[in-house]
Amino acid sequence: MRRVLAITGILIASIVLQSTIFARINLFGVRPDLILVVTICFGLLYGPFPGLYLGLAGGFLLDLAGGGILGINVLTKALLGYGAGYVGKTVFKDNIFIPLATVAIATLAGEITAFLFLTAFGWQGRFFNYLFATVLPLVLYHLILMAPVYLVFLRYLNLQGKGRI
């Protein structure tokens, strides 16, 4: 129960930080997606289905807070959380390069998926402009954020090896 409350607190804190402080910090011209970073950390440490569930919850809260098209963040975060959990089952998670590589790939996959959904709903963006102006700076931003977030998950929450929620 304590871990459920801790994860819920981290999820709510991530939404609050993302919509307040990080909304004003415009590093590389983009805003970070803390929910994605937290979902990747959680999926890597707990497995596919807990990553899926946290991605669903975080994506839903993000869609509600953002006021955009409901469902884009739910779908992408859930799939990426599941994918990170699947990767977490087969790799050595104490090596910091694994979460860094996972968040980079997840950011690329999530943003390309969001781009495809937005173009399906009539958004008139150019893919390569979006890739170089938004996606690649966002990957760099997430790489910077992933190390401290992952270390918090490993050290302070003591989630690794503790079983399922």
Image (cartoon, grey):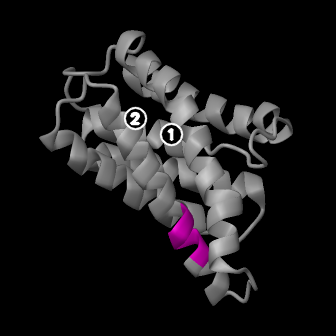
According to the picture, the residue beneath numbered tag 1 turns out to be 37
Q: Badges 2 and 1: C-beta atoms under 8 Å apart?
A: yes
161 left or right of 65?
Answer: left
| Name of the residue lying farthest toward the top | 156
Residue at the spot 19% in from the left edge and 21% down from the top edge: 161
46 lies left or right of 60: left
Sort mark 2 into few (<14), some (14-19) or many (20+) by Cα contacts within 10 Å: many
Range drawn in magenta: 111-115
Residue ranking furthest to the left: 90
Percent x, y for residue 42? 38, 36
Return the x and y of residue 117 as percentages of the image width and height. 58, 79
Q: Residue at x 36, y 45 (%)?
A: 102
Count every numbered label the image shows and give the total: 2
Res 1 visible: no
Label 1 neighbourhood size at 10 Å, few (<14), some (14-19), many (20+)?
Answer: many
Indicate whether 157 appears above or below 110.
Answer: above
Q: Is residue 117 magenta?
A: no
| Residue position for label 2 | 41
Q: Write the residue at 56% across / 54% down.
A: 59
Chief secondary structure of the magenta portion: helix
Asked if residue 135 is positioned above or below residue 72 in the image, the reply reads above
| Badge 1 element | helix
What type is the residue that disc 1 sits on?
Answer: Val
Residue 60 placed where, x, y %? 58, 56
